[in-house]
Amino acid sequence: MGSTGVIGCNSLDVVRRLSPAWQVVALSAGKNMRLLKQQIDEFAPQYVSVQDEHSRQELIQLFHGRLPCDVGVGQAGLEEAASVPAHLVISAVLGAAGIAPTWRAISQGAVVGLANKETLVAAGDLIMEHVSVNGSSLVPVDSEHSAIFQALLAGKRQEVESFYITASGGPFRTYSVQQLKSVTLEQALQHPTWKMGAKITVDSSTLMNKGLEVIEAHHLFSAPYDKIKVLVHPQSIIHSMVEYVDGSIVAQLGNHDMRLPIQYAFTYPARVKLDLERIDFVKLRQLTFEEPDLERFPALRLAYEAGRAGGAMPCVLNAANEVAVQAFLEQRIGYLHIAEIVERLLQSSDYAVPRSISDALHIDEDVRRRAWLLIQKEELGQDV
Ligand SMILES: NC(=O)C1=CN([C@@H]2O[C@H](COP(=O)(O)OP(=O)(O)OC[C@H]3O[C@@H](n4cnc5c(N)ncnc54)[C@H](OP(=O)(O)O)[C@@H]3O)[C@@H](O)[C@H]2O)C=CC1
Ligand SMILES: CC(=O)[C@@H](O)[C@H](O)COP(=O)(O)O
Ligand SMILES: [Mn+2]
C-alpha cells in the first residue's frame, strides 16, 4: 500500500531482489499513474487501487483500454487491496488514509510491515488490540522501530530499562528561533541524511516525526513514555537503542537506506544477503549526540504531552499536523504555524476516548475540518 511512494518503491526493489521467493499480489497508488503502470507491467498484481476516478481513467488510457488487473478506487479500493490474501502487507500509504486499510489487513491475520506511523498514532490502542484479537503481527519498517525490534532480541522484555530513539535533528538543528521564523519550503525539504516523501521530510524538520515515533514506540513495544528518550544523532547511523537493566546498551546501525529495515520485515526472523553500501567506520570518524531542544522544536513536546494524555489526543495531534503540513507544503502558512496549529487544536479539543476505529476516523475528520477553518480564518500568529 503506497507503492508509488518512497517506501513503496523501496519495498518493490526488495521484492525484485527476493524474487522469485516473493511475489506481489496487490498494489495501491495515489495519483501517479505512469509509475503505477510500470509497476503493474513489472510485478503483475491481481488487483490495484488508485486514489480517485480520474486516476482510474488515466490508468485505463495508459493501458489503451485493456487493463491486466482489477482496479479499485478511493478508500474502498484501498481496503479491497488490503484484503487480497497475502503473507505480508506493507502499509506505506501516507497519513491517516492508511488507517482503514491497515485495519483491514490486520483483520485478515496478515503480517503487517508498518511504515505508516500515523495509523498507530491516531488509533494505537485500538490497532494493537485488533492485532492481538486477529492473531496478526506488526513488524516495524520505520527505521528506529526496526532498530528497537532488533535490539529487543538481545534480552527479555522485563529486562529493558529504557528505549533511545535517535533523531537526525533535521535541517534546522542549529537554527535559532529567529532563523526558524523565515524558513522556506525549499529549506524544509532538504533532509540532511534521508531521502523521503515531502510530508515526513517536513515532520523531520519540526521534530514532529520524532514525536510521532515516540507514540509509535509506546504502542509497538508497550513502552511507558517516561522510558522513551529521544537523542539527537546528526549522522543517523545508530537507528535506535535499547538499554537493559544491567546498563548494557544494544544498538542497531546501518547506512541511510530503508531497504534494510524493509527487507528485514520481509525475512524476519531470518537475515538474507543484501548488497547495499556498507558502513565504513574509518571514513565516518565520529558519531555525535545532543539533547533535543523542546523550546525551539515544540512539536516534540506536544507529541509527548498528547501521548501521555492518551484517549483522543494523539489522534488530534496527528490530524492537526497532517493538515498543517499540507498547508505549509501548499505555501498557505508559515513554518512556525505548523506547531501553532497543532497546539491550538490540542488545547481546544475534548473528544471522548475512541472506542472503535470508526470513532477514531470521525475524530480525525472533525479535527481536519477545524484545522482548515483555523487556517482560512487567518488568525494565526503574525510574527512568523
Ligand atoms: N520515506 C521514508 O523513509 C519513511 C517513511 N515512513 C512512513 O511511510 C509512509 C509513506 O512515506 P513516503 O513513502 O516517504 O511518502 P510518499 O509521499 O513518498 O508516498 C506516499 C504514498 O501514498 C500514496 N498516497 C498518498 N495519499 C493517498 C491517498 N489519500 N490514498 C491513496 N494513496 C495515497 C502516494 O501515492 P501517489 O504518489 O501515487 O499519489 C504514495 O504511493 C508515511 O506514513 C511515512 O511516515 C516511515 C519511515 C521512513
Ligand atoms: C528513515 C526514517 O525512519 C525516518 O523516520 C527518519 O528517522 C527521519 O529522520 P529524522 O530522524 O530526522 O526524523
Ligand atoms: Mn523513522
Image: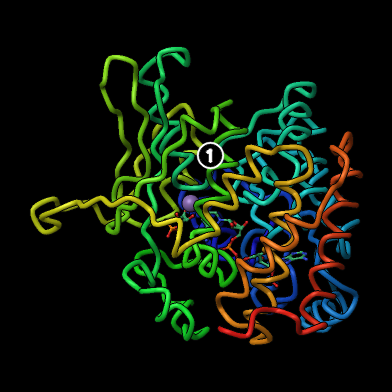
Quadrant of residue 197 within the rendered picture: bottom right
Left or right for 311, reference 254? right
Q: Does 50 appear above or below 318?
A: below
Residue plotted at (82% across, 77% down)? 55
Left or right for 350, reference 42? right
* Rendering coords of residue 138 (x, y %): 63, 33
> Can the viewer see residue 276?
no
Query: Badge 1 is on which residue?
Result: 266
Residue plotted at (69% across, 54% down)? 317
Residue plotted at (84% across, 37% down)? 353
Quick one: label 1, few (<14), some, or many (20+) residues within 10 Å? many
Left or right for 272, reference 338? left
Q: Nearer the viewer, residue 184 or 7?
A: 184
The N terminus lies in quadrant: bottom right
Q: What element does badge 1 sit on?
A: helix
* Rendering coords of residue 332 (x, y %): 68, 86
* Rendering coords of residue 145 (x, y %): 48, 40
* Rendering coords of residue 28 (x, y %): 74, 60
Q: Nearer the viewer, residue 192 or 332?
A: 332
Q: Does mark 1 have its CB less than 8 Å from ligand 1?
A: no
Q: Amino acid at mark 1?
A: Phe
Q: Does 267 appear above or below 2?
A: above
Quadrant of residue 283 within the rendered picture: bottom left
Residue plotted at (45% across, 77% down)? 180
